[in-house]
DNA sequence: GGGCAATATTTGTCTATACATATATACAAA
DNA sequence: TTTGTATATATGTATAGACAAATATTGCCC
């Protein structure tokens, strides 16, 4: 191996760390087509020499690209440019409760009703109860500046020993519903997004028209012990929501 | 600082690397509620001592959790457990063209029509052309075992110098449409998912009913030079598609 | 007690090195 | 021709140490 001076250099006075400067440079070469899909990018050793960086720093840069599915590393062979996907993507859905906590954003929750009901067939299955056992059923409307946006409907595991304060149900996020029963507090959720149209009642509550398009997001909410502690749906007004997935970009 | 023997130990003979063993242990403590939302997890130095690992290895473990939004690090303060999000999530949409390439999965594409048309107002804006310039307009149906699932409708930048082979349009993914013009080949896309209902024609083409719920995914497809090279929509039958986001898990 | 400077703590970045593991190639032996 | 071995190269994991930058704590002076 012939020793030589670095070809590229990082800007040392820049606030952008070296590993990111290298990652961005490689990304640019990939997206510009200089490094085509399927081809091998320079080895880590070569990048070390070319940029005058240590291998760990080079690896970190490659790790960034690998995380974003721009390259794929194979031990003993090298690191290769992945075929760019223009189909497929990742959608983030909004977290209203986060918004409500952090800013005075005009969001608020209206409690439509709370009932202790006996679990129906599906609810019993989803909450792992026997049919007829008591569950909590709540309905809420999420509004932005007095305009209804989301209809929330949930079945919750009901701990009869705890007193039920309706004031708690109207505000805050689902986690707060379980604050009094720590072992039932939710830690994660499975979400399923489907397309639907509003029925009579939903249309009335959401100040929209029957048959109007909408999203239905089914939620299965789990506690730490993998117990399902809540099950329900959010109905999002189709004219107020769209989910976006914006391509790549460091 | 008092020197002491490690409290925990990694299994050295395990094939699971140390950083993952630590990450999983921490994840378990977070999801079990032992490390509650908002609290600080042990410092990197403490974890080094407790587990007998170097700081870089500890940092890598924390990096895994950070990537998955379980913790958030703050310089000079520490690393904190993030409030678990039961709202909000990440949806992946299917990549049919990938499926079609890799397996004999019963998917196929039927070309409904190809036309060279003069760009309308919206198409002209989206493709950065003057109104009236020529664009390629194609319509396709994506089927699984002869059942129509998706209606694809696209405007494409049209390179008049290249001959147009209809055979190419019917099969393969959008990238193949541009194979003859390398500088126009797509590298990424912005996607927007909205809720809609089928109109008369869409219902007929998708073998469904007018007014039935459906997803509409608008696509803005970009080439390497950030030029928008295609614009269109996919209409997904609402009764055939749902998008799921399954909670966390290493 | 309040304000301020010095010190300690904590995470962020980077280097240098070591060994493990997977791959590709060349060459020798069966 | 096949099999085995040695070697070079590549990525994967882990260690130890250094300095930087942001924050928290302590102690001192007024």
Image (spheres, coloured by chain):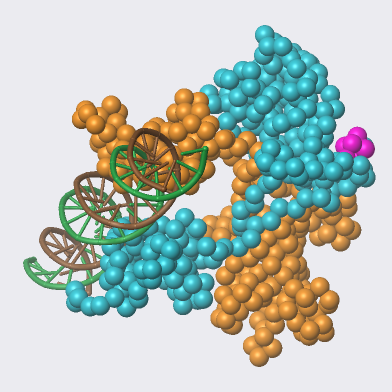
Chain colours: A orange, B cyan, C brown, D green
Q: Nearer the viewer, residue A120 or B173?
A: B173
Classify residue B4 by image quadrant: bottom left
Classify residue C9 by image quadrant: bottom left
Rendered residue at 74%/67% (across/down): A232
Could you tell me what secondary structure mostly forms the magenta stretch? Answer: helix
Is B226 placed above or below A16 here? above
Q: Nearer the viewer, residue B9 or A67?
A: B9
Q: Is residue B232 left or right of residue A60?
A: right
Q: Nearer the viewer, residue C16 or B76?
A: C16
Is C4 placed above or below B159 here? below
Classify residue B196 by image quadrant: top right
**Percent position of residue C10, x then y:** 29, 64
**Percent position of residue B186, x then y:** 61, 28
- Which range of residues does the magenta coloring cover? B201-206
Residue A91 visible, this angle: yes
Q: Is residue A101 left or right of residue A6?
A: right
């Amino acid at each position: 191996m012939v020793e030589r001076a670095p070809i590229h250099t990082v800007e040392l006075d820049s606030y952008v760390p070296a590993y990111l400067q290298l990652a961005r440079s490689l990304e640019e070469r990939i997206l510009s087509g200089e490094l085509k899909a399927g081809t091998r990018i320079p080895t880590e050793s070569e990048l070390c020499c070319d940029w005058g960086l240590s291998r760990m720093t080079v690896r970190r840069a490659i790790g960034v690209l690998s995380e974003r599915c721009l390259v794929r590393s194979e031990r003993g062979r090298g690191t290769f440019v992945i075929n760019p996907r223009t189909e497929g993507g990742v959608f983030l859905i909004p977290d209203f409760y986060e918004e409500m906590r952090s800013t005075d954003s005009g969001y608020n929750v209206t409690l439509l009703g709370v009932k202790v009901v006996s679990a129906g067939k599906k609810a019993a299955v989803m909450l792992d109860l026997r049919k007829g056992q008591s569950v909590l059923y709540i309905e809420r409307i999420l509004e932005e500046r007095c305009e209804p946006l989301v209809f929330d409907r949930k079945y919750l595991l009901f701990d009869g020993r705890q007193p039920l304060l309706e004031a708690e149900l109207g505000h805050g996020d689902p986690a707060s519903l379980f604050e009094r029963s720590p072992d039932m507090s939710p830690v994660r959720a499975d979400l399923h997004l489907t397309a639907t149209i509003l029925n009579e009642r939903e249309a009335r509550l959401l100040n929209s028209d029957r048959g109007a398009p909408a999203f239905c997001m089914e939620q299965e909410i789990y506690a730490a012990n993998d117990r399902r502690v809540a099950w329900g749906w959010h109905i999002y007004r189709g004219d107020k929501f769209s989910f976006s997935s914006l391509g790549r970009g460091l």
